[in-house]
Image (tube, helix red, strand yellow):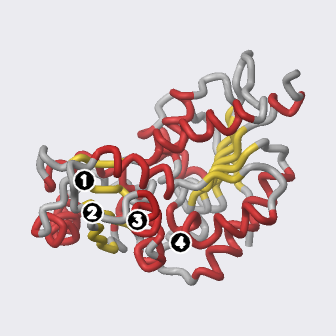
Amino acid sequence: MVSASSEAPIGVFDSGLGGLTVVRSLLKRLPNESLIYVGDTARVPYGPKSPETVQRYASQIAEWLVAEGVKVIIVACSTATAHALTYLQQHVTIPVIGVVEPGARAAIRATRGGPIGVIGTAGTIGSGAYARAIHALAPMLEVRQEACALLVPLVEEGWLDHAATRVVVREYLAPLKHAHVDTLVLGCTHYPLLATVIAEEMGRSVQLIDSAEETASETALTLDARQLLRSGGPAMHRFVASDAPEKFLMLARQFLPGAITNVEHVSFA
């Protein structure tokens, strides 16, 4: 028998706008599901912050989402996944899903033998989370990583196809082009919003990996296994920002046209 809690929403959080790429995949993969999205815009970016600080931020948001009655939490941020996923899975009573392992699996399927490139925030790359996840499944594959600290602020500014963004992307990707990677993991959920610029710089022969679709598939499997899939009826979506909700709404509408009409403000500090 399907549990009544199947009507509960999915909880998703990120440091800012980036997790909307996961929301976009969820809306495609699980159109019947309601969701609550939290963008921690007051404290973005997470990448330069210490693991302890990121874990504290993630715990605060996860506790809030649980109190709001969600049935599963998706940590739609690679940095928070790297630093806080294990802690959350041990301390939260509902399933918690990260974006690193789904992205690693997708990269292994896509590569033609490597090397696999990974770009991410300083926190994600410094943690080695993607390299560990890839090597756990395919230890012989070579992994090349580059921290790209400026990309999240550029996305949060809405500079998705700006000349300055192209210069920064070219500089960050040069070592990976030189290494002839055949697959590039966009190891931050903000980065798919720059996929066009990144693809143009890397060339057609390089497969870009967006972990959002794989994460949505894993979420579907998790809910199905626990008989928590929502059967139907109008889905309700809430979007929350911890700072500047009007700016969040303006930028978010570019990525999810028609899906976002209002953004709530909630402080987690």
Q: Which residue is mark 2?
A: 117
Foreground: disc 4 or disc 3: 3
Q: Which residue is mark 3?
A: 135
Q: CA distance from mark 1 to mark 2?
A: 6 Å
**Residue at image point 68% right, 34% down:** 237
Q: Is residue 228 visible?
A: yes
Packing grade of label 4 (10 A; few <14, some 14-19, many >=20) is many
Q: Which residue is mark 1?
A: 183
- Element type where label 4 sits in the image: loop
Q: Sequence-wise, which precedes: disc 4 or disc 3?
A: 4
Q: Which residue is mark 4?
A: 46
- Element type where label 3 sits in the image: helix
Residue 42 is left or right of residue 129, and the answer is: right
Q: Sequence-wise, which precedes: disc 1 or disc 2?
A: 2
Query: Are circles 2 and 4 on residues that touch, CB within 8 Å?
Result: no
Q: Please identify the residue farthest to the top as the structure is shown.
A: 233
Packing grade of label 2 (10 A; few <14, some 14-19, many >=20) is many
x and y, in percent, of residue 157 in the image? 39, 60
Packing grade of label 1 (10 A; few <14, some 14-19, many >=20) is many
Foreground: disc 3 or disc 2: 3
Packing grade of label 3 (10 A; few <14, some 14-19, many >=20) is some
Name which quarter of the figure residue 152 lies in: bottom left
Residue 225 is left or right of residue 252, and the answer is: right
Q: CA distance from mark 4 to mark 3?
A: 25 Å
**Residue at image point 56% right, 53% down:** 76
Amino acid tagged 3: His
Foreground: disc 1 or disc 4: 1
Q: Quadrant of the N terminus?
A: top right
Of 108 and 37, the residue lying toward us? 108
Q: Sequence-wise, which precedes: disc 1 or disc 3?
A: 3
- Element type where label 1 sits in the image: strand
